């Protein structure tokens, strides 16, 4: 008889003990971390799928464009004396070994005017921003100097001189290119370049009248090219001026140099930007002997951004999943403790699963609509579901309204944090401080010694 009473009292203690309730809520929160981790994996998987589709679209249309040139290429001879022992004559013989190398001279002035017509291409539910850039490149070459390398005039192969232009995207070029150099026109043809980060376009050998031996020679070339995401240039001119006009309203200016803030304009109809880069601003010289080095670290230009990334925002929202579950469980725990209403662990579990459903709804709806609409739809659905369920558990419209208001405020608070960038940490910290203070004020009247 005594044992039955002890078992009954122990069972009653389990049902009413605040400590047991706290442990149970804590365990359930840890258990719900499992579906939350799967949701994060799902978001990352969908984002990776988006990247694959965007990459495929870009490859078919034309990848990002990095352009530099034109560059004057002049071969020259170097002489090496090789001594060898001749057994027949019992003496050393000397042999002049001639090696052909290339000298590269950048233009004195380079002016680039580009007009970018952009659009979005979609496949299934994904889309990428692509563009067609119509460019005009003009400038001048001055007489190159070989004095720094002690190269004699007779070793300079002027008759083998050419002009090259380098680009990362030959596939996107929409028409045959022709370089006007002085009074002569030279077609550009692609040339295989081993172990290079760019592809090369090169003219045929230049005529005598086109060589800047003594006088400055002007050049001009028109180029139309398909590309995606970004357009960049390397400032190879002693003075490089770049002007870009586009109908895309969300540009991101990147690289080593930013456009002139006085002339830069960004409106809902597009943007205008101008750059001016001098040789003294660069980290490389005006000429190279031997091989062209990799100088893309000096590139600058513009990246065309798609204004929103739904998966990035969904992932940021999912990071607050632990906070939402913990605070919601805490609200139910305080109500249970204050009102003495018994809430079964299974009911806590159902509430937690309903909270995790918010993120699956958010991902699926945002793929077909804007993030704002998806967030509102998912939030309303989950708040209605949990508040209606709480009415059945707590038997009170007052508690139902309190839970609905608490969840609505919490989801609104998280949405505001997601939208903020510079002030997200500040607003989040202040909000959590207010939430903690409110919980402390509510819980101060609870008799924690009731165990």
Image (cartoon, rainbow, N blue to C red):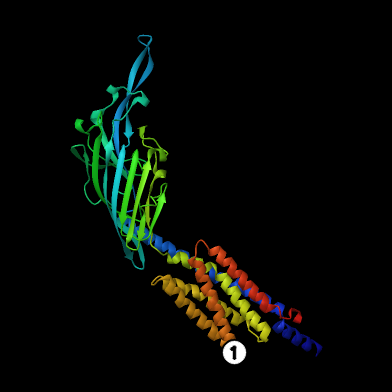
Determine whether 38 is above or below 176 in the image.
below
Q: Quadrant of residue 289?
A: top left
Looking at the rendered structure, the number of numbered marks drawn on it comes to 1
Residue plotted at (33% across, 31% down): 103
Residue farthest to the right, as pictured: 2
Give the x, y percent position of residue 59.
33, 55
Can you identify the residue that label 1 sits on?
A: 396
Give the x, y percent position of residue 170.
29, 48
Q: Is residue 233 visible?
A: no
Give the x, y percent position of residue 194.
34, 40
Residue plotted at (58% across, 83% down): 402
Q: Quadrant of residue 395?
A: bottom right
Give the x, y percent position of residue 28.
62, 75
Mark 1 surroundings: few (<14), some (14-19) or many (≥20) residues within 10 A: few
In this view of the protein, which residue sits in the foreground, 216 or 365? 216
- Left or right of 381, for residue 335: right
Residue plotted at (28% across, 39% down): 164
Q: Quadrant of the N terminus?
A: bottom right
In this view of the protein, which residue sits in the foreground, 343 or 206? 206
Q: Is residue 366 visible?
A: yes
Q: Quadrant of the C terminus?
A: bottom right
Helix, strand or loop at mark 1: loop
């Amino acid at each position: 008889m005594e044992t039955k009473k002890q078992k009954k009292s122990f069972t009653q203690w389990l049902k009413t003990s605040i400590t047991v309730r706290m442990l149970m809520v804590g365990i359930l929160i840890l258990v719900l971390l499992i579906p939350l981790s799967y949701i994060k994996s799902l978001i990352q998987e969908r984002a990776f799928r988006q990247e694959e589709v965007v990459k495929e679209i870009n490859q078919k249309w034309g990848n990002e464009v990095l352009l530099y040139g034109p560059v004057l290429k002049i071969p020259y001879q170097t002489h090496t004396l090789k001594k060898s022992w001749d057994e027949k004559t019992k003496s050393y013989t000397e042999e002049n070994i001639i090696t052909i190398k290339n000298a590269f001279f950048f233009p004195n002035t380079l002016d680039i005017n580009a007009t970018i017509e952009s659009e979005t291409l979609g496949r299934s539910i994904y889309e990428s921003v692509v563009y067609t850039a119509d460019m005009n490149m003009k400038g001048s070459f001055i007489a190159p100097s070989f004095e720094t390398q002690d190269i004699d005039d007779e070793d300079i192969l002027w008759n083998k001189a050419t002009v090259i232009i380098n680009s990362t995207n030959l596939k996107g070029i929409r028409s045959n290119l022709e370089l006007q150099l002085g009074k002569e026109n030279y077609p550009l043809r692609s040339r295989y370049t081993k172990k290079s980060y760019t592809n090369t376009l090169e003219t045929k050998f230049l005529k005598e009248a086109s060589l800047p031996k003594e006088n400055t020679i002007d050049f001009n070339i028109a180029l139309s090219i398909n590309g995606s995401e970004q357009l960049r240039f390397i400032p190879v001119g002693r003075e490089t001026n770049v002007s870009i006009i586009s109908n895309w309203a969300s540009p991101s200016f990147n690289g080593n140099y930013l456009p002139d803030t006085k002339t830069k304009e960004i409106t809902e109809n597009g943007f205008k930007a101008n750059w001016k880069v001098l040789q003294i601003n660069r980290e490389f010289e005006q000429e190279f002997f031997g091989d062209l080095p990799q100088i893309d670290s000096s590139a600058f230009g513009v990246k065309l951004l798609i204004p929103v990334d739904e998966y990035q925002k969904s992932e940021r929202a999912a990071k607050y999943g632990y906070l939402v579950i913990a605070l919601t469980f805490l609200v139910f725990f305080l109500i249970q403790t204050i009102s003495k209403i018994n809430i079964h662990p299974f009911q806590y579990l159902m509430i937690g699963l309903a909270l995790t459903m918010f993120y699956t709804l958010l991902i699926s709806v945002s793929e077909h609509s804007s993030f704002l609409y998806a967030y509102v739809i998912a939030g309303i659905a989950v708040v209605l579901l949990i508040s209606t369920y709480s009415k059945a558990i707590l038997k009170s419209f007052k508690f139902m309204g309190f839970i609905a208001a608490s969840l609505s405020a919490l989801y609104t608070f998280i949405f505001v944090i997601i939208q903020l960038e510079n002030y997200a940490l500040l607003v989040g910290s202040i909000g959590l401080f207010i939430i903690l203070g409110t919980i402390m004020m509510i819980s101060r009247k609870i008799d924690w010694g009731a165990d």
